[in-house]
Image (tube, rainbow, N blue to C red):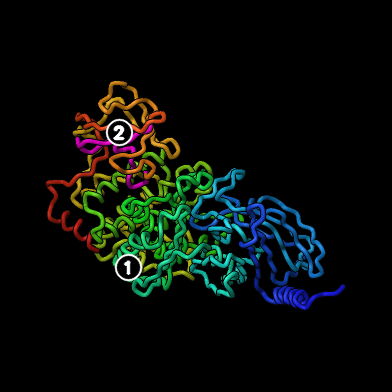
Amino acid sequence: MKYTIPRMIGMMLFIALMNSALLSQEFKATIDFKNIKDDKAHVTLFPPKINTDEILYIMPASIPGTYARMDFGYFVKNFKATDAKGGFIPVRRLNDNEFLIIGANRLAKIEYDVNDTYDDTTHTLDVFNPCGTNIQSDSNIMFGAHGFLGYFSNMQQIPYTIECIKPASFFCSTSLSKKSISDTVDMLIAKNYDALVDNPAMFSKPDTISYMQGGTKISIAVYSTGGKVNAEMVSKVIKPVTKTVEQFLGTMPVDRYTFIFFFAGMDRKELRRKEAYGALEHNYSSVYFLPETTDESILKSWIAQTAIHEFLHILVPLNLHSKEIASFDFREPKMSSHLWLYEGVTEYFSVLARAQSGEMSEKQLRQTLRQKLFGSQFMMPKPVAMTELSKNVLLPEYQKMYGVVYEKGALLGMFFDLTLRERTNGTVTLLSLIRTLTKKFGPDRPFEDSVLFSEIVSVAGKNIQPFLQTYFDSPTDIPYAEMFSKVGWKFIEEDSVQGFSFPGVRARMDGSNLILNVRKEDNILGAKQGDTVIEVNDMQADQANEEFNIASEINDPDSESDITLKVKRGDDIITLKAKPKSSKKLDRSIIRVDEAATEKQQAFLKELLTK
């Protein structure tokens, strides 16, 4: 058979690449994001030399930072293995994530197709969108490596070199080491599988901004399905966030950081099906999946608190973590007992940093803490120790309570911080404690899960040990009155307060729609059962978020000011306007300034809000 010169050269390159992969201890992969078939990307993997007859190829059941099982191997289709001559090697699929290759010592190449998670409707487990994958060769690729590549058993520490074939107009945003080979090929390089998973990438038409914050290069990459959000808009929110974090930490412990944003339009129901808005942290980047909006104030409310939390993860767990995180078991994930530290303390710091910078007033701080108190009561129906919840968070019973680490975990972080300051006469704060521990441990020196409390005691003193045992290692509730009194605030379980309402009318979210339930037809708003709210005081009703619950503007207005609603009733758009009714109501879990606070208490609060 005759070969043309280009074809002969192509075959020679292919054989050379195979031989190189076989001789080197390195995974080499090619992923084709340009020629998508049936909404799937084709993956070709050249493994390192394998000396055993059988070996497992493993796709992750979960990844760090998610605290849930997602089984990314489910999205792998048409898996096949071949030897150097192109002959097929038997493969037995043991479950969603594991492929047993029989005759692995002859293995030269693996090939398979990968479906994305964003628009999948068949998977029984919900894949949180910020750690999911998207394959749209005409617009966007969300590349979380865990969704496309696995590793061989006992080969998790071997380097990866990945050739990404992409449309010429696409730019790759990532904190991973990257080489642009041509306008259609980017090479991504990772020292091992953990580093590969820890550094996601986004391919899309370039909409990026970079700047220096201290000694850290900050990069922002934005993709917006309807083009309503751009990097310039996002940077106006992120720049104050990175400045606040630098001021709070006093230094920037990373040399680079990438913010990756995917904004889904309200018309993209296939992307919004799971309503999985949120973010996922990595050591050198974070990924955000959010709804589109043209309102920059709403954009700020969505991004600011979330971004500061994710960015603060450069402190923990990047610089302080246990072996469960350092050597993550992607096959059968094992959780650390100290989720309260990684997520709860980080959330507390994200609130404290904003309060110290002046972005959050003292009143807003009390309101935020009160919201977290309500959240913790709602999410944890029965008392559970934070260490117990952390260790068992992947089990269904505990998974339902997972969100409480951001609520009670943050409140415990504050209580711990106040107690440390009090018992050490201000010489140790929670932040200084973590800084001290990071000097002993750090990114490459994980601690044993069981010794963290003793390490804390060695820094803060023996009188802190009862606190750790009482509030982290057992289900004891926080004594809120005692905690808040330290800073001159009064905690009131219940009280009769002046309230405002629209009797007979309640608003509720139904998917992405804000619906009015009307029990009283002659209500002061003039609302009718089933009215769909489009706007509340000129704010679009679909712009609800964690910090601003737009339904509460109707259900629980905080003043007697007029409210104006635009509602859809049948085919008509109607404007409703009314003043809420004033009445006394029973309120609970109130945090107020104590008018009788001592100078010592006031000074303690001032110290907390300044350093």
- Left or right relative to 452: residue 374: left
* 553 within the magenta span: yes
- Left or right relative to 209: residue 579: left
Query: x, y percentage for residue 526?
Result: 29, 26
The front one of 420 and 257 is: 257
Tell me which corner region of the image, top left, top right, bottom left or bottom right, holds residue 16. bottom right
Q: Amino acid at mark 1?
A: Glu
- The residue shown at (51%, 61%) is 325
For residue 318, say whether it is visible: no
* 504 within the magenta span: no
- The residue shown at (12%, 47%) is 596
- The residue shown at (82%, 64%) is 87
Query: Which-is-in-front pick, marks 1 and 2?
Result: 2
Query: x, y percentage for residue 323?
Result: 51, 63
Query: x, y percentage for residue 420?
Result: 29, 59
Q: SS for tag 1?
A: helix
Q: Residue furthest front?
A: 572
The front one of 216 and 226 is: 226
- Left or right relative to 498: residue 174: right
Q: Amino acid at mark 2?
A: Thr
Which mark is first along the chain, 2 or 1?
1
- The residue shown at (62%, 67%) is 165
Task: Characterize the local packing of mark 2: few (<14), some (14-19) or many (20 or more) Cα atoms within 10 angstroms.
Answer: some
Query: x, y percentage for residue 172?
Result: 52, 67
In the rendered structure, which segment of residues is drawn in magenta?
544-568
Which label number is shown at residue 363?
none
Residue annotated with mark 1: 246
Residue annotated with mark 2: 575
Q: CA distance from mark 1 to mark 2?
A: 46 Å
Magenta stretch prevailing secondary structure = loop
For residue 170, say whether it is visible: yes
Whether residue 119 is situated above or below residue 45 in the rendered picture: above
